[in-house]
Amino acid sequence: MKPKAYPYFRFSTQIQEMGDSERRQQDKAKKFACEHGLDYDDSLKLHDRAVSGFKGLNFETGKLSYFMKLVDEGSIEQGSYLIIENFDRFSRMEPRKALSPFLTLVDKGIKIAVIDNNEIHSDQSGFVQLMATILYMERAHDESRSKSKKVTAAKQNAKEQLLSGNRKTLWKWGTPKWLDIANDNEGVDGTGYKINHERTKTIKKILEWVIEGRGTGYIIDKLKEQNIQPWGSSSGIKLDKKKPKQWYNSQITRIVNNRALIGERELLVKDSDGKNKRIEIIPNHFPAIVSEEYFEKVQAARRSRDLNRDKNGKLKAGAIMRGGGRKGRTFTNLFQKLAVCGYSIEGNVSKHKCPDNNRFMVYANKDRKFSGGKVHKLRYLQCSASRESGSQCKDCRKLYRYEDMETAFFTHIKDVSVATIFGDDKQDKSKAQEINTKIEELKIQLLDAERQVEKFERAMEEYDGISTTLLKQLKKYETKLENIPNEIKNLYSERKLLKARKEQGKEIHHTLIDLIGALNGCENDTQLYELRLKISNILKSLIDRIEVYNRGNFSSDSATEQKLKNLRESAGGHLSDEELIEMESAIRKSIKQQASKPEIPYFVVRYVSGESRLVMHHPEDPRSLVMNVKWDNEGLTEAPFYDSTMLKLYERGIKSKDGDWRNGTTLSD
């Protein structure tokens, strides 16, 4: 029985895939197997296409690592052959690293055949052959290292020329997928690039969908529906074989967030000594396909969809990750990912804190169907913790009628000024100054990090041995060098967004009011869904969160006992037992009287400007707001509009004849 011979093919770049490399290696392997009486077997498809041997990726994630795994498992018989064209194909790592997997295979009974040398290496090979193998490995590594240094130097030189204005492009490096290198080196407006109009058409569709509030899943489905194929490599080099089979979330995210859309180029440049790196931004380097204002509008829409994260993309403290969730046939819940249980927030308005933290309010459909098919709609908002078994939250499980809250909110938002939502000129100036200060502070930190990295690198060179402490400090400052430029970039973007928000604020508010008006009388489910989707997305761009207090300001048994305990501790030694009992009795009586009154829910709207509004509506008429006041962490900040008459009438059981408590109601007898 002939020994099995498994051919291994590898090349480093996609360009080589377009050539003859694989066919040449395959023909050589077949010929070698035939001449040596081996059973040629390519069923394992040990083909590492565009995989670096210099970095050892073929041993980490490539097909060679798969082959070694099969050898370890015993799936490859001892005495089998691994055929390679030359040592370059096996590895271009330094000999010390490349020799280890080579000897591992040989020691496990695998024979490695090198075609160009016409040599077969086995566990019977002598010392001279092993030394020759090491020399071959050294030569392969030196060639790759030399090539790598030349390419790195060429890139660095090209970047410096680009920064000085002595060149227009970096060839294929970093060319966006919607641009091509211009053959005449002129291109659009002398940039050196020409626009791929078919791809820019697709990009503009994607950006429009983002502004509409569509998620990545929806966008990918739309691209499939319109038979728009995913792009392969940058259009600076034409490669079609490596096209992905489908669109991925990461592709959409990279396109949407890419500032090359407005013409910016970001370069990572090393200093002359090759140690420290810096980020250089070149404005108007690429031909812009959208305006900067439009780009910032897209970013605002994108960020507004993820309320779990702050403006830097970091998870908010205490945030519970939630996806978009189901929207229903007509987008039932406008407050999805906006409404939170107020009682679950530390230091909340009601002063009652439940055991859970930062919980969302969720939509609950409790419709009742009667005989005859009639449906009584009962839709509510409730704290997500109250739906979980084993939750410690017992006191705030009351449901909030969804239609009441939505109606009250619409009544409130129609009368809110643009300055309340987006901030006035004074707030904008203060915020811009705060951003500028942060930018300058980060620039100082960046310079310090660069100096510290240089200092610790010198210390490492002088230190005899490896210091764990020095390594930790070096890693700390290297991390800062990576993160600070991104933080600065985000602050620049936030400053631009601040200006764009102010300019667009009035238009956005008018659009919102128009959309709310269009809901009246709309009976087509598809149209209703679109209207409510647009309203929801606008709300997410205007509001940070809405705190919902579905029981109003109530006092739970646990809160009462805690209040009495605090009283006893503070009054210890100052009051007699009789006086203490009398005071406790008075407090319990007061709390009992308060508890006998109806619990009137309310909510607090926290706008992106930092301002907040406390809204309470009449229990029987959500169109009638009994409280609509400015609120901050200290409480009321303006004279409140508070219609106590309506509440007193309600508490006494007096009804309105027509159910309308606004503007001087007509009372029933």
Image (spheres, rainbow, N blue to C red):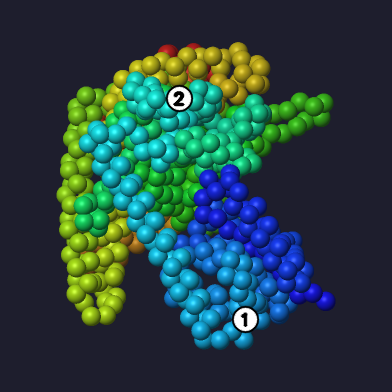
- Front one among 101 and 432: 101
**Residue 615, placed above or below residue 57:** above
The N terminus lies in quadrant: bottom right
Q: Quadrant of residue 412?
A: top left
Q: Position of residue 591 (x, y in %)?
A: 40, 47
- Front one among 164 and 88: 88
Q: Quick check: 642 left or right of 363? A: left
Residue 617 visible in the snapshot: no
Instruction: Give the Cα separation between the discs numbered 1 and 2.
Output: 56 Å
Rendered image: mark on residue 148: none
Rendered image: mark on residue 122: 1
Q: Position of residue 24 (x, y in %)?
A: 63, 54
Taking the spot 32% from the left edge, 32% from the top edge, the residue there is 168
**Residue 664, placed above or below residue 52:** above
Residue receiving disc 2: 195
Q: Position of residue 95 (x, y in %)?
A: 45, 73
Q: Secondary structure at mark 2?
A: strand
Mark 1 surroundings: few (<14), some (14-19) or many (≥20) residues within 10 A: many
Instruction: Residue type at mark 2: give it.
Output: Ile
> Are the two marked residues, 1 and 2, in contact with CB atoms closer than 8 angstroms?
no
- Front one among 519 and 573: 519
Instruction: Residue type at mark 1: give it.
Output: Ser
Taking the spot 68% from the left edge, 73% from the top edge, the residue there is 81
Taking the spot 66% from the left edge, 60% from the top edge, the residue there is 28
Q: Quick check: 172 left or right of 10? A: left
